Amino acid sequence: MAGIPHPYFDWDDSIPDFLAQLKLDLQNRGIDPNDNAAGPPTGRDNALGHLRACMRGRTLECCSKGRTAVQIGANALNEAVGQLGNAIIKLRAVEDAWNEDWRTAGGRPTNAPVNAPNANAGNTVVVAGIRFDQAVWWLKTHFPTVEEELRDLMYNTIRKGDMTIDELYRKILRIGRRANYRPKELRRKFLDALPLLWLEKAEDIGEHLPLDELAKSFMR
């Protein structure tokens, strides 16, 4: 549609910010990523094509390495073996196309040959095609910069630096949820990221406050 700026995503761009821009752009263009009935092409097909068109630079190279299918992990494999061809196998937790969780299936994008669940003979299940919701989930959870942030949190290399307290809090929370950290662990990671002067302030505020209350206290 003329007059609508096209969002782009490059290597160091914020993934949440990009997805928010992409969601608005698709809405403005009348593309529904949840639509799998109209068409062809369906709204889901158009949304996936639009997402790919937003990639540039190293991001385009990373997202174009022949991934044409989804490999299903051990949980779904165990459930699939011996089932009939029309059996319904739970692969994901569904909210909408922007918030699906494919950890249920333990899956990941792959270029391995397709191997249907009902044809499985002890090999990994590989389902044909990459869907828009799968691509969004992979971008939010397995893009290389996301994996790098996870390592930074794990090895305590995240530092407040020029970030505001709110930015640091949201970053720790976002990465921690990805890694299933408990609240006390997230609080410890947050404190580890603070410089000495801020740590002393944290002690004055209340070193035993929950993370959300501690962060809000800093921002008052």
Image (cartoon, grey):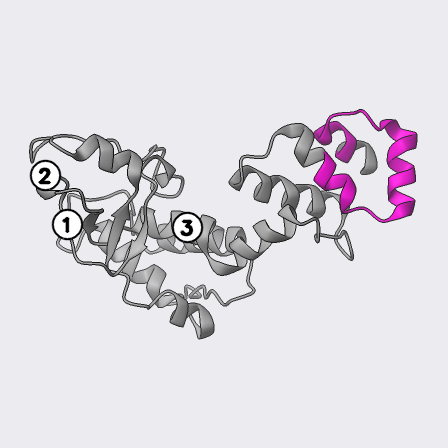
Judging by the rendered image, the residue that carries numbered circle 1 is 115
Q: Residue furthest front?
A: 122
The picture places residue 163, in percent across and down from the top left corner, at: 74, 53
Q: CA distance from mark 1 to mark 2?
A: 9 Å
| 153 lies above or below 162 | above
- The residue under label 2 is 118
Amino acid type at circle 2 is Asn
Q: Which residue type carries mark 1?
A: Asn
Pointer 3: residues within 10 angstroms few (<14), some, or many (20+)? Answer: some
> Percent position (x, y) of residue 73?
30, 42
Residue at horizontal 71 percent and vertical 30 percent from the top: 212
Query: Please, what secondary structure does the residue beneath circle 3 have?
Result: helix
Q: Position of residue 26 (x, y in %)?
A: 36, 53
Q: Is 207 in the magenta? A: yes
Residue 120 found in image quarter: top left
Quadrant of residue 81 in the image? top left
Residue under label 3: 23
Tell me which segment is drawn in magenta.
188-215
Whole-Å distance between the Cαs marked 1 and 3?
A: 32 Å
Kindly give the residue lying farthest to the bottom in the view shown.
57
Please, what secondary structure does the residue beneath circle 2 have?
A: helix
- Tell me what residue is drawn at x 70 percent, y 48 percent: 156
> Is residue 136 rendered to the left or right of residue 113?
right
Could you tell me how far apart the alpha carbons at marks 2 and 3 are, in whole angstroms?
A: 35 Å
The one nearer the camera, 191 or 205, is: 191
- Residue 220, above or below 142: above
Q: Is residue 1 visible?
A: no
Q: Quadrant of the C terminus?
A: top right
Give yes or no for contact between labels 1 and 3 (Cβ–Cβ under 8 Å): no
Three-letter amino acid code at the position of disc 3? Lys
Q: Of the two numbered discs 1 and 3 on the same chain, state the one appearing first in sequence.
A: 3
